[in-house]
Image: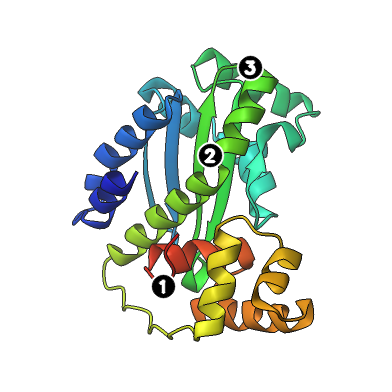
């Protein structure tokens, strides 16, 4: 994992991300892994492992309008398991049949990502397996997938033409402690107990760190802190 993340960090062109995402797909032994982003100005970039005929069909039939994954993730900040999305409409069910027929898989897990100036992206893993197997996979790898998603997004933003780097604000020692324990999977109550502080005080530290990191929520803040090397687990 560390070696692959270093390769992602070392990418010097957007085209380099294609090779990296194929490596991650093989590492996790899933059918597909995809990263797709849209800048505030409407420019798009994508890398992934879907079959080219599915990508072409998706564009030709403008599935973006009815894709429950796109529609559902745009309304959320947290990762989404495809089973929890609304597939009840006729158009959505037909889209799902087409996707499975083209090898996308019957299971999926997508991480919505948001950046400055209206940037929106999705990092998706999909596979063909039963519900129990998929539940074990997402439970085991959820934190890694969220981290990888934010690494991809950060790298894509860095490589965006004419992009100015965001000013970094250091975290305080207490903020580092709080974010590190959260990254390790501690609950808020456990973090507060470990640091001998109240949950209210913990909330202040977490919100301060989230603001400094420009994160939308706590999970996003933890991922950004990890990807920037501000915390280590």
The relative height of residue 97 versus residue 112 in the rendered view (above or below) is above
Mark 1, secondary structure of its residue:
loop
Q: Which of the two labelled residues, at mark 1 and mark 3, occupies the earlier sequence position?
A: 3
> Vertical placement of 158 versus 175: above or below?
above
Q: Which residue is drawn at 59% across and 73% down?
A: 178
Q: Where is residue 8 in the image (x, y as percent from the top left)?
A: 28, 51
Expressed as whole percent of the image width and height from the top left, the position of residue 34 reads 43, 38
Could you give the CA–CA distance between mark 3 and mark 2, rounded to whole angstroms?
27 Å
Q: Which residue position holds label 2?
A: 141
Assign a secondary structure to mark 3. helix
Is residue 218 visible from the viewing direction of this image?
yes
- Residue shown at the point (18%, 57%) measured from the top left: 12
How many marks can you see?
3
Placement of the N terminus among the 4 image quadrants: top left
Q: On the image, which quarter does residue 142 sit in?
A: top right
Residue at position x 39%, y 83% from top? 168
Quick one: label 3, few (<14), some, or many (20+) residues within 10 Å? some
The label shown at residue 97 is 3
User: Which element type, helix, strand or loop, lies under badge 2?
Assistant: helix
Measuring from the top left, give residue 122's x and y in whole percent: 51, 48
Q: Can residue 41 be seen in this view?
A: no
Q: How is the image coloured?
A: rainbow
Residue that mark 1 sits on: 230
**In the rendered view, would you say 175 is above or below 128?**
below
Nearer to me, 232 or 136? 232
The answer to which of 73 and 22 lies nearer the viewer is 22
């Amino acid at each position: 994992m560390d070696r692959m993340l270093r390769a992602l960090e070392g990418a010097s062109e957007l085209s380099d991300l294609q090779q990296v995402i194929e490596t991650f797909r093989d590492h996790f032994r899933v059918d597909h892994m995809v990263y797709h982003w849209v800048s505030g100005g409407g420019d798009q970039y994508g890398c992934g492992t879907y079959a080219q005929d599915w990508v072409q069909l998706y564009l030709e039939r403008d599935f973006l309008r009815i894709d429950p994954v796109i529609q559902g993730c745009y309304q959320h900040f947290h990762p989404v398991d495809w089973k929890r999305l609304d597939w009840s409409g006729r158009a959505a069910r037909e889209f799902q049949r087409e996707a499975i027929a083209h090898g996308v898989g019957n299971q999926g897990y997508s991480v919505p990502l948001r950046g400055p100036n209206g940037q929106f992206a999705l990092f998706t893993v999909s596979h063909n397996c039963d519900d129990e197997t998929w539940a074990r996979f997402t439970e085991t790898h959820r934190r890694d997938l969220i981290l990888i998603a934010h690494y991809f997004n950060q790298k894509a933003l860095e490589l965006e033409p004419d992009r100015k780097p965001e000013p970094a604000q250091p975290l305080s020692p207490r903020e580092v402690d709080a974010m590190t324990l959260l990254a390790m999977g501690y609950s808020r109550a456990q973090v507060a107990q470990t640091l001998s502080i109240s949950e209210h005080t913990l909330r202040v530290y977490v919100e301060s760190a989230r603001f400094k990191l420009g994160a939308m929520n706590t999970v996003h803040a933890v991922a950004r802190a990890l990807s920037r090397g501000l915390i280590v687990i």
